Amino acid sequence: MERGLLWLPLLAIFIGLAWQGAKEYQKVEAYRHWAEQFERAKYDILAVIGQKGDEITWGKPTKEEPVDLQTFSLFDVSKVIVLVDEEEIDIENIPTKGRAIALQFFFTQPDNSVQIPFTEIPLAAEWCKFLQGELQRLQKTGG
């Protein structure tokens, strides 16, 4: 009986981990279904982002569908940067560590910006490079 009582906490931890894994799997599946409509998409535990043409849509992942979705046009964006610990970084020389990582979009309207959280610095830098290229392409073609 004593051995059984010793294994009980381990069993409880195992059940908790299995439950958390099932919840995360549901989020990933909901994201996969949501991302099918985009040309380029990203999922992590903090945010989902999708790009289709000049439209960027982002929100928070849930086990059903992403929520708090916001959409904006790259035509309204003047600049995109990566923030690590609330400081702009050089995307060609990314740091190896940082806590708060975000992609920040500055709009053509003054004092208006959006920050999309990321969990990985290299992934945020990759998205930033891609979107900077898209902004340059849109500016050259005039739309």
Image: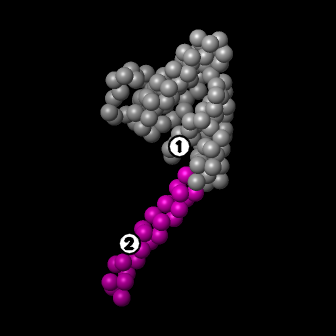
Q: Is residue 12 visible?
A: yes
Q: Earlier in the sequence, mark 1 or mark 2?
A: 2
Q: Is residue 66 visible?
A: no
Q: Quadrant of the C terminus?
A: top right
Question: Is 45 drawn above or below residue 140 in the view shown?
Answer: below
Q: Residues within 10 Å of mark 2 (few under 14, many from 20)?
A: few
Residue at 48% over, 66% down:
18
**Colouring used for the render:** one colour
Q: Is residue 129 left or right of residue 65?
A: left
Q: Residue furthest bottom?
A: 1
Question: What's the amino acid at mark 2?
Answer: Leu
Could you say whether the residue bearing mark 1 is in a helix, strand or loop? Answer: strand
Residue sitting nearer the eye, 10 or 131: 131
Question: Magenta: predominant secondary structure element?
Answer: helix
Residue at 37% over, 83% down:
4
Residue sitting nearer the eye, 134 or 110: 134
Could you say whether the residue bearing mark 2 is in a helix, strand or loop? Answer: helix
Residue 87 occupies quadrant: top left
Question: What's the amino acid at mark 1?
Answer: Tyr
The magenta segment is 1-28
Residue at 38% over, 72% down:
10
Question: Is 93 drawn above or below residue 37 in the view shown?
Answer: above
Question: Is 58 drawn above or below residue 19 in the view shown?
Answer: above
User: For mark 2, what is the residue?
Assistant: 10
Question: Is 66 drawn above or below residue 132 in the view shown?
Answer: below
In the rendering, at what x and y percent does residue 68 appear? 66, 40
Q: Nearer the viewer, mark 1 or mark 2?
A: 1
User: For mark 1, what is the residue?
Assistant: 43
- Asked if residue 12 is among those painted magenta in the image, a careful observer would answer yes
